[in-house]
Image (cartoon, grey):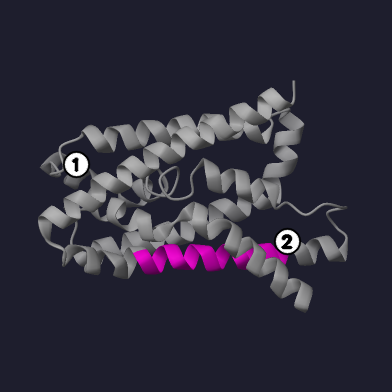
Amino acid sequence: MAHFLNTMLFAFLALFPILNPPAMAPVFLQLTGGLKDAQRNHLAALIGFYTWAFLTSLLVVGGWVLKLLGISIPVIAIAGGLLLFHSAWRMLNRDPRFRESDTADLKTHMRDKAFYPLTMPLTAGPGAIAVTLSLVPRGPIWHPQTLLGFLALTCGIALAALTVYLFYRFGTTVIRRLGATGEATITQLSAFVLLAIGVQIVWSGLRELIRGL
């Protein structure tokens, strides 16, 4: 039982700083600025669920699929980092006000937008993907210890996904109390942080590839 709890806590502590829901809550509020509170809350729940489902799926099949295709984790990190960089760059250079067409599109295709881009790559981005793949238990898949490890890691991922929902659901209320200027400032800072994270992830992937030469 102690090993199960330690593994679960380790997965949570590894993913929480990468998912970073406190920093991502202003980004979520900015991207959903034209939605009603009920719609935004529903979207937060969808993102929390999709984060858990996506990372758990990666945990179960990702490691073996990458080995089968011959794709290394550093390559995944570089590709994801570039995608995150692109998303952050668009956020920095876009009009902070939501256009009516953007709002209508998000309302109409809310379930689709909940996964891309709001879950992947903005919430569960390349860093979370790389961390999740690194957590894949070693050993025969049908061994009881391996299966228990998968279960513990899945619970840890669920805890991390729950914090995403909580911060997206309740953090936006606090952010809006800062006013339009404070909200815009936090949003731009968060976008810049995302940009820096994207650069760091790409550099980390390149460094790992160079070391492997």
Position of 23 with respect to 10 (left or right) is left
In this figure, which residue is indicated by the disc labeled 1?
102
Q: Mark 2 falls on what kind of element?
A: helix
Q: Position of residue 102 (x, y in %)?
A: 19, 41
What segment carries the magenta color?
A: 151-167
**Earlier-in-chain disc, 2 versus 1:** 1
Instruction: Name the residue beneath numbered marker 2.
Output: 150
Q: Amino acid at mark 2?
A: Phe
Residue 58 in view: no
Which percent across, then down, holds residue 170? 30, 70
Res. 180 image quadrant? bottom left
Which of 186/131 is in front?
A: 186
Residue 156 included in the magenta stretch of the image = yes
**Residue at figure coordinates x 16%, y 67% from the top left:** 177
x then y, percent, for residue 44:
35, 61
Answer above or below: position of 39 versus 191: below
Disc 1 element: helix
Rendered image quadrant of residue 205: top right
Bin the neighbour count of mark 1 within 10 Å (Cα to Cα): few under 14, some 14-19, many 20 and up: some
Label 2, label 1: how far apart the Cα atoms are: 39 Å
Quadrant of the rendering where the C terminus is positioned: top right
- At horizontal 40% and vertical 33% (from top left) the residue drawn is 85
